Amino acid sequence: MRYTTERLLRWLLCSCLCVLAGPFTVSAGAQDSFLQRLPDDRPSLDINGLRGFGLQVMSSRHLVLVTDLPEDQVQELPALADQLYEQLCRELGPPAPAADGSEFQLTGFLMAAEERFAAAGLLPPEKYVIRHGRHLGYRFWMRDQTSDYYRRHLLLHEFVHCFMMCETGMSDIPPLWFTEGVAEFYATHRQEPFRAGVVPDSEAGFEGWGRIRELREQLRVADADVLLRDVLQPADSRFVSELKYAQGWALFWMMQRHPELQQSFRPFLKVRSRRQFERAAAGLAADTIARLHPTWLLVLDSLTDGFDEMRSFPQLHPEWEDWSAVAPAQDVFVRADQNWQASGLTFERPTRIRITAQGRCILSRAGGDWESEPQGITIDFIAGQPLGQLMAMAVPTQPGGVPERISVGPAATLLIPGGCELWLRINDLESSRADNADGYQVRISAE
């Protein structure tokens, strides 16, 4: 079915307004802000009695942790939760006060041997199946993980869920991609000094996370569910695959870190309920919604460890002209210190074009600067192509297939599908562009 621009806008807007999530109701008393958070539902703990089950309890201002793991593996976790709480309050706003004036605090159960917690009567109701972690009110449960990083990550993930839902509970939550995306975003952290909401610069130190790898592997799968509509309107609304968590993380991260999206999506930082999500989505400009689809595809294509948030996000609102208005030729300068750059050209119909390039750029490396021409230099390869080679990508403006990088070099003839924008870049790692210089002069002409 062919999508018109008008239909695309309507579809994306409806997705953002949660129509995709199915029908729901909001009680007449629902408000856009909350005067009080829900009552603390945690039963009291018999700390001395728990020792008989092989459990120990350690506490901080905002977390009581019950665990059967050795103390040296977990003693840092309560203080880490306190640090996360302070960042959440700064960036998302503090939770509503309690009716009794008590401070916000959670109880977490970190389990190596679940049977110990069962014997102590500390597991959630049977309907709350624990896959990796599960939250309920002011409590959460999590299984122990195989790496220190991911143990911390999962604890912070569940802490965020409880923080976000302490005012509404489970009765009025935003779409799952959003709630899981927020939790994944703030759980992704560096420890010293502590900072949540980071992009890993390598897999070392983030063992067990793997969200970027999951997204990149899915891009190579035919008919992969990586389009924006697959994230907003998944075929299976349950979060049962690691890919869904990766997509939720990536979309929330893009919304909050893309320099041209930050202002538009700032209202989402205050979202706690479905009603608040609706209101935030209703405030999005139509042209911003329209640009989410191609921007998402461009970001996924170049998302790697060490992604440079200052240089690697594509421009959201470049100036476009249809090829029919500028043919037979258009000149574009492509910089080495930026990721995908708009050619300024769109193609309504399938069109065969010729791209030629000349010039030199400097590609900076720790061992010294390298000079490259449009064919690239085979001393190194990025995504299977020579470092410094001129690349192109035809990006559909409407829901459709996943675009692929096209090797251009000094000259190439390309068939651009209809309904696409042409984007160009110089091949390099996204973590290595900061000190690059110069670029290529590119001519796009009729074939």
Image: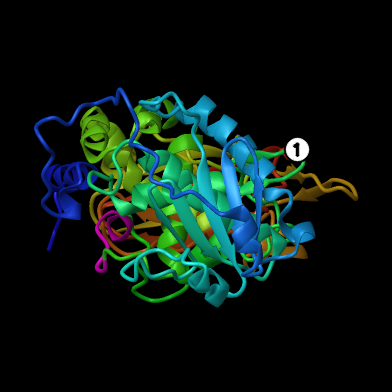
What is the tally of numbered marks visible in this picture? 1
Nearer-the-camera pick, 103 or 385? 103
Residue 425 visible in this rendered orientation of the protein: no
- Residue 442: x %, y % from top left: 55, 44
Residue assigned mark 1: 193
Task: Identify the residue at image location x=58%, y=43%.
Answer: 63
Quarter where residue 255 is shown: top left
Residue type indicated by callout 1: Pro
Q: Quadrant of the C terminus?
A: bottom left
Q: What kind of colouring is applied to the model shown? A: rainbow
- Residue 266: x %, y % from top left: 40, 27
When the figure is inspected, residue 56 is found, relative to residue 24, above or below; the finding is below
User: Is residue 232 rendered magenta in the image?
Assistant: yes
User: Is residue 430 rendered magenta in the image?
Assistant: no
Nearer-the-camera pick, 66 or 73? 66
Q: Which residues are magenta?
A: 229-236
Task: Identify the residue at image location x=41%, y=35%.
Answer: 316
408 sits to left or right of 378: left
Quarter where residue 229 is shown: bottom left
- Residue 4: x %, y % from top left: 14, 49
Q: Quadrant of the N terminus?
A: bottom left
357 sits to left or right of 239: right
Nearer-the-camera pick, 444 or 201? 201
Task: Identify the residue at image location x=27%, y=40%.
Answer: 290
Badge 1 marks a residue whose secondary structure is loop
Residue 173 visible in this rendered orientation of the protein: yes
396 sits to left or right of 318: left
Label 1 crowd (10 A; few <14 / some 14-19 / many >=20) = few
